[in-house]
Amino acid sequence: MGIGKDQAKDQKAGSFIGYLNLIGPRDGGLSDAQYEGAQQYLRHRQRVARALLSPAAIYDPEAPAGEGIDAEAYASWCKDVLDEDETLRQMIQAEQNYSRDNLWAALDLVVIQDKPMHAMIGATRVLCNVFARHFKTAVDNRHAA
């Protein structure tokens, strides 16, 4: 796969996004901010599934849950999660309007389904830039000490 033995032992090597981070941005991969943005998106996607009461949702420690929950607090949490999802979708669509690549396909195939689609690396990088901006994983001042 083009990574060394030590890098292959890294947990990131288990996913295509992680592999792209291991090879680094200079070799056509992802920066740490882009990788962290993609990971934040996957966590966000699980919160959306939980807010929609999807049977595929996993436990989320940030979500109000359990017996005796405050229904109003839970409804407010769900609204906040779904509002953030709508904002994120609008950001992706705004970037899609200026990109020749199919960002929605990269989101589905590379980020969500974790398929190694080498033809979509460019679109994945653009998409992960959107995530990095939204989740604020990018370093604002790269020249700071």
Image: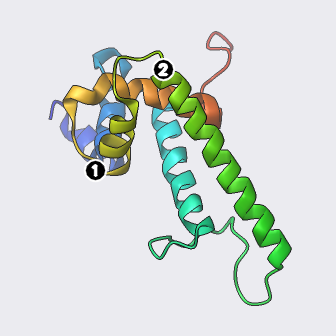
Q: What residue is at 66 percent from the left and 54 percent from the top?
A: 82
Q: Which residue is mark 1?
A: 14
Percent from the top left, x then y, of residue 65?
Answer: 70, 78
Lateral position of residue 35 relative to residue 21, left or right: right
Q: Amino acid at mark 2?
A: Asn
User: Does dot 2 land on a helix, a strand or a loop?
Assistant: loop
Considering only vertical position in the picture, is 103 above or below 80? Answer: above
Which of these two is toward me, 53 or 114? 53
Lateral position of residue 102 relative to residue 57, left or right: left
Q: What residue is at 46 percent from the left and 24 percent from the top?
A: 96
Q: Nearer the viewer, mark 2 or mark 1?
A: 2
Percent from the top left, x then y, of residue 124?
Answer: 37, 30
User: Counting residues from the N terminus, which is met first, the one under dot 2 or under dot 1?
Assistant: 1
Lateral position of residue 83 relative to residue 47, left or right: right
Which of these two is toward me, 77 or 60? 77
Q: What residue is at 58 percent from the left and 30 percent from the top?
A: 91
Mark 1 Cα shell of 10 Å, populated few (<14), some (14-19), many (≥20): few
Percent from the top left, x then y, of residue 127?
Answer: 45, 30
Q: State which quarter of the image contains the N terminus.
A: top left
Question: Residue 132 falls in which quadrant of the image?
Answer: top right
Distance between the alpha carbons at the discs numbered 2 and 1: 32 Å
Tag count: 2
Q: What residue is at 37 percent from the left and 49 percent from the top?
A: 112
In the picture as drawn, the residue positioned furthest to the left comes out as 1
Considering only vertical position in the picture, is 122 above or below 61? Answer: above
Q: State which quarter of the image contains the C terminus.
A: top right
Residue 31 in sight from this viewpoint? no
User: Does dot 1 land on a helix, a strand or a loop?
Assistant: helix
Look at the numbered discs 2 and 1 and tell me whether their residues touch, using CB distance below 8 Å. Answer: no
Residue 110 in sight from this viewpoint? yes
Which label sits on residue 97?
A: 2
